[in-house]
Image: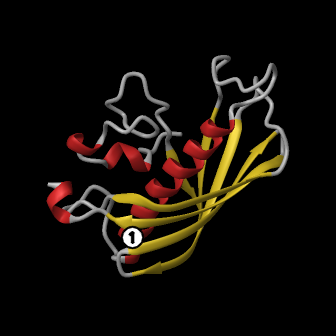
Amino acid sequence: MNEKAFQDYYPDQLSHCYGCGRLNQHGLHVQSYWEGDEAVCRFEPRPYHVAIPGYVYGGLLASLIDCHCTGTAAAASYRAEGRDMGTEPALRFVTASLHVDYLRPTPLGVALDVRARVTELKGRKVVMSAELSANGEVCARGEVVAVRMPEHLVT
């Protein structure tokens, strides 16, 4: 993709998250993009993201859903305010609630597709539903409630 990921617009001081921080050299570097009204993230787990041989560790799946959705919350809020991403004041979100249902084992060695949709955007809160798929099969579903980070933490 040629466009910048949502996470690429985070200010440097907020780009150290293990899941989505571009400045965390050991992190996952989750990157999210719009595809219409859905936000999409593609991620290929490494062999060390193993739970049991051949399958992905569930904590990684939760992290992917979590960071993808907080990035989507920021992007959706910029859209709702009619602003370009990266304009000031910065909009950054943190997780208030994360719920993940694991539907089937997720295979290692294939790209994962995480798709999120905003189900509610009201004030400082954004609620999203997400699905994580491998080989076209939904392996996990999640719901994330994200809240806007207080301004004193953003600047």
User: Secondary structure beneath disc 1?
Assistant: helix
- Quadrant location of residue 44? top right
Q: Amino acid at mark 1?
A: Ser
Q: Position of residue 68 (x, y in %)?
A: 52, 50
Q: Is residue 143 toward the left or the right of residue 33 in the image?
A: right
**Eyeballing the image, is 38 above or below 114?**
below
Query: What count of labels does the image hold?
Result: 1
**Eyeballing the image, is 10 above or below 130?**
above
Q: For the C terminus, give its image quadrant.
A: bottom left
Q: Residue at x 29, y 62 (%)?
A: 149
Q: Position of residue 152 (x, y in %)?
A: 14, 60
Q: How is the image coloured?
A: secondary structure
Q: Position of residue 26 (x, y in %)?
A: 42, 22
Q: Residue at x 42, y 50 (%)?
A: 6
Q: Is residue 28 toward the left or the right of residue 13 in the image?
A: right
- Quadrant location of residue 141? bottom right
Q: Residue at x 65, y 27 (%)?
A: 45
Q: Residue at x 36, y 60 (%)?
A: 93
Question: How crowded is the residue under tag 1: few (<14 C-alpha within 10 Å), some, or many (20+)?
Answer: many
Q: Nearer the viewer, residue 101 or 86?
A: 101
**Eyeballing the image, is 127 above or below 6?**
below
- Quadrant location of residue 151? bottom left
The residue where tag 1 is placed is 77
Q: Position of residue 103 (x, y in %)?
A: 82, 51
